[in-house]
């Protein structure tokens, strides 16, 4: 397959200053991209149509990689269902429409596996996306993102827009969001367990029963999948990005305890929700359509993430990132 020439493209990467976006933009630079536009929220509110229109008129992108999202863990999703639906729907709606009007050559929408039905049989296959309602705590976010898949498919049919839709599994890695109110499961657990180690406490409390399962994709692997899809994939079908490896939260906690070097007791708070019972993806389509497969296994990825988290701490005993 011929090499895609990024040097001739102006690439707009929404969310390009974020956790995933920083890795994506670096991979683009490594491939020769010279014109990468990363809009900052302070300068452009993507939920406002007039600001999106001005952004695209000014930057004239050939390719849009839409990574920006408003999202958090179970607690944040329960606290902000309306905001998460509206913000994610609005951003995608304006970007797709005005990208289409400006004649962009490619639109890559990063979706979410929160769009899958709550009781999807494992492993999740893309054709099961419409077989039921998502898990309740993240349904508004998941449905907003899934609506953008329908929009891209409709725009492909009517306008010929080359819009593709990717479904990454839960991400983690260096640079993740470790905020105690909005972080996802891996950074939240690393923060909690590492704090217990620093404070020499012998117990931590973890939400739920530990019986739910998840699949986790290292951020560098996800970024590679997005760039490969932009280079090689042109089709209406959504595509999973993941490892195909499932782990229970209980076993994940044990792996994080080992990575942190903490040997205390975990108390499971059964009054808190587990979220979706199981998550694990069938990743066959990504391999077949654009040659993607993940390379970083969970144990190695956790070790790298713990090392990064320790490195960004300002002083021993203070777990606030610089």
Image (cartoon, rainbow, N blue to C red):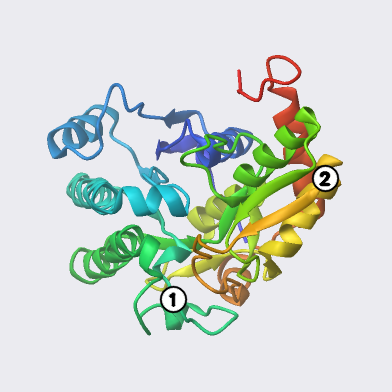
For the question of whether residue 3 can be seen, the reply is no
Please state, as top left, top right, bottom left or bottom right, where the N terminus lies in the image: bottom right
For the question of whether residue 78 can be seen, the reply is yes
* Residue with the mark numbered 1: 118
Q: Residue furthest top?
A: 315
Question: Crowding at label 1, few (<14), some or many (≥20) Cα neighbours within 10 Å?
Answer: many
Q: Locate residue 53 relative to residue 32 in the image: left or right.
A: left
Q: Which numbered disc flags the more N-terminal residue, 2 or 1? A: 1
Q: Residue at x 28, y 60 (%)?
A: 144
Q: In the rendered image of this protein, does residue 184 appear above or below residue 43?
A: below
Where does the image place residue 250, in percent across and percent down from the top left?
Answer: 71, 63
Q: Residue furthest left?
A: 50
Q: How many marks?
A: 2
Where does the image place residue 17, in percent across and percent down from the top left?
Answer: 47, 30
Q: Secondary structure at mark 1?
A: loop
Q: Residue at x 36, y 44 (%)?
A: 70
Q: CA distance from mark 2 to mark 1?
A: 30 Å
Question: Crowding at label 2, few (<14), some or many (≥20) Cα neighbours within 10 Å?
Answer: many
Where does the image place residue 187, in percent across and percent down from the top left?
Answer: 62, 43
Q: In the rendered image of this protein, does residue 40 appear above or below residue 76?
A: above
Q: Residue at x 46, y 61 (%)?
A: 166
Where does the image place residue 270, in percent across and percent down from the top left?
Answer: 57, 64
Q: Locate residue 79 relative to residue 233 in the image: left or right.
A: left
Q: In the rendered image of this protein, does residue 109 appear above or below residue 235?
A: above
Q: Residue at x 38, y 85 (%)?
A: 131
Give residue 252's quadrant in the image: bottom right
* Residue with the mark numbered 2: 259
Front one among 219 and 162: 219
């Amino acid at each position: 397959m011929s090499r895609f020439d990024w040097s001739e493209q102006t690439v707009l990467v929404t969310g390009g200053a974020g956790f995933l976006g920083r890795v994506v933009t670096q991979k683009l630079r490594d491939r020769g991209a010279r014109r990468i536009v990363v809009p900052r929220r302070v300068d452009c509110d993507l939920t406002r149509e007039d600001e999106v229109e001005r952004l695209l008129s000014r930057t004239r992108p050939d390719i849009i990689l839409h990574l920006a999202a408003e999202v958090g863990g179970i607690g944040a999703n329960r606290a902000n269902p309306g905001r998460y639906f509206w913000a994610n729907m609005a951003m995608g709606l304006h970007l797709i429409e005005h990208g289409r009007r400006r004649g962009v050559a490619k639109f890559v929408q990063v979706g979410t596996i929160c769009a899958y039905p709550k009781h999807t049989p494992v492993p999740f296959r893309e054709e099961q996306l419409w077989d039921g309602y998502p898990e309740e705590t993240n349904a508004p976010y998941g449905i907003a993102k899934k609506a953008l898949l329908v929009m891209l498919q409709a725009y492909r049919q009517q306008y010929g827009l080359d819009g593709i839709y990717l479904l990454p599994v839960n991400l983690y890695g260096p640079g993740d969001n470790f905020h105690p109110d909005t972080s996802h499961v891996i950074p939240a657990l690393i923060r909690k367990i590492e704090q217990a180690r620093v404070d020499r406490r012998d117990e931590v409390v973890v939400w739920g029963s530990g019986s739910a399962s998840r699949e986790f994709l290292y951020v560098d692997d996800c970024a590679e999948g997005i760039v490969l899809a932009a280079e090689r994939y042109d089709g209406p079908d959504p595509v999973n990005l993941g490892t195909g490896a499932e782990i229970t939260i209980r076993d994940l906690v044990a792996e994080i305890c080992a990575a942190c070097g903490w040997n205390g007791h975990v108390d499971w708070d059964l009054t808190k929700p587990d979220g979706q019972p199981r998550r694990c993806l069938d990743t066959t389509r990504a391999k077949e359509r654009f040659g993607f497969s993940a390379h970083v296994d969970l144990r190695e990825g956790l070790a790298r993430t713990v090392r990064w988290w320790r490195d960004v701490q300002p002083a021993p005993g203070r777990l606030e990132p610089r």
